[in-house]
Image: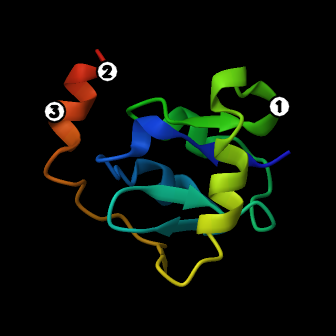
Amino acid sequence: MPYVVTENCVDCRYTDCVEVCPVDCFYADAKQLYIHPDECIDCGACEFACPVKAIYNEDDLPAELQHWTKINADKSTGSDVSHITDSEDPLPTAAAKKARLGL
């Protein structure tokens, strides 16, 4: 099962996960990152690299986050995202969001 980026990434866009991804399956819009489900090889490296705990294996998604599977599938193939393969600076709101999450 592919990995899924969830709501903790919104307003963050830390790219630690992008750095460790061996297949470059990440896409980004102005607010967050997404994983393309057909490109993800289920290695799990991204889950542990995410500083805001936004990434889950699809099989491990809590019920309240299940809808993020479709969001990742839809957004990663949309025209308003870019393929991201290199580390970038997080959004200016990232540190505050991380603090609100208690991480």
| Colouring scheme, one of rainbow, by chain, secondary structure, one colour | rainbow
Dot 1 or dot 3: first in sequence order is 1
Name the secondary structure under disc 3. Answer: helix
Q: Around disc 2, counting alpha carbons within 10 Å, would you say few (fewer than 14), some (14 to 19), or many (20 or more)?
A: few
Amino acid at dot 3:
Ala
Q: Around disc 3, counting alpha carbons within 10 Å, would you say few (fewer than 14), some (14 to 19), or many (20 or more)?
A: few
Badge 1 vs badge 2, beta-carbon distance below 8 Å: no
Dot 1 or dot 2: first in sequence order is 1
Amino acid at dot 1:
Asp
Left or right for 39, reference 20: right
Name the residue at the top extreme: 102
Name the secondary structure under disc 1. Answer: helix
Left or right for 14, reference 5: left
Name the secondary structure under disc 2. Answer: loop
In the rendered image, residue 37, in percent from the top left (x then y), is placed at 76, 60
Q: Mark 1 points at which residue?
A: 59
Q: Mark 3 points at which residue?
A: 96
Left or right for 53, reference 1: left
Circle number at residue 45: none
In the rendered image, residue 62, in percent from the top left (x then y), is placed at 69, 21
In the rendered image, residue 54, in percent from the top left (x then y), is placed at 50, 35
